[in-house]
Image (spheres, helix red, strand yellow):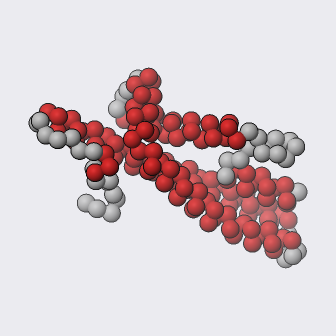
Amino acid sequence: TVITLTAMVVAFIFRIDFDFTGKVSSSFFNVLSKGLRVFMLFSLPAIAWEELGTLQAIQKSWKIIRETWTEIIGAIIFSNLITVTMVIPLCFLYYFYQAETISSDAVVIIMLISSMFIFSLSSMIQQLFSAEIYLWYIRWEEEVQYAYAHSEFEVDFEDFEKPSLLRK
């Protein structure tokens, strides 16, 4: 049961879908669900912050994804690296269980608490990155509108300074 729980925790953290035969389900649907999640991370702020309608929010989300896809992929990679780093101690926990130095009850409790923390942290990192990218895009749009109104050259998105919490 601990081996099954370990597999389920790792699958839950990495959002891998298993069917009852133990095989990973279609990778197409896995990629599709992750893509829809990224799409929603940009659609919902458009609805909430800018009070756009559903279709306008979807169009804006698509524009943001097309313009910032490299930053989005970087955020996903960073989030996954943090998740992998946090899963490594769980591997040691499994090793201690196999060596019979820790009880299965303790393993189950630690695994459940750890998986909840890791999943929450991973989701928070992805949401923070999406908010940063969204706000960066909004600032760029405002700069483009200002440049257009004052007959100045438009600033390319790649040349526009990325906002940072560390800078004032």
Q: Quadrant of residue 145?
A: top left
Which part of the image, by quadrant, shows the N terminus?
bottom right
**Residue at x 28%, y 38% (from the top left corner):** 141
**Does residue 50 lie above or below 114 as drawn?**
above
As drawn, is 23 to the left or to the right of 30?
A: right
**Does residue 10 lie above or below 21 as drawn?**
below
Q: Nearer the viewer, residue 90 or 28?
A: 28
**Does residue 73 lie above or below 151 as drawn?**
below
x and y percent of residue 45 in the render?
Answer: 42, 37
- Residue 48 visible in the picture: no
**Residue at x 84%, y 55% (from the top left corner):** 4
**Residue at x 44%, y 33% (from the top left corner):** 62
x and y percent of residue 2 in the render?
Answer: 85, 60
Q: Nearer the viewer, residue 143 or 9?
A: 143
x and y percent of residue 118 in the render?
Answer: 62, 58
Which part of the image, by quadrant, shows the C terminus?
bottom left
x and y percent of residue 113 in the render?
Answer: 69, 59
- Residue 159 visible in the picture: yes
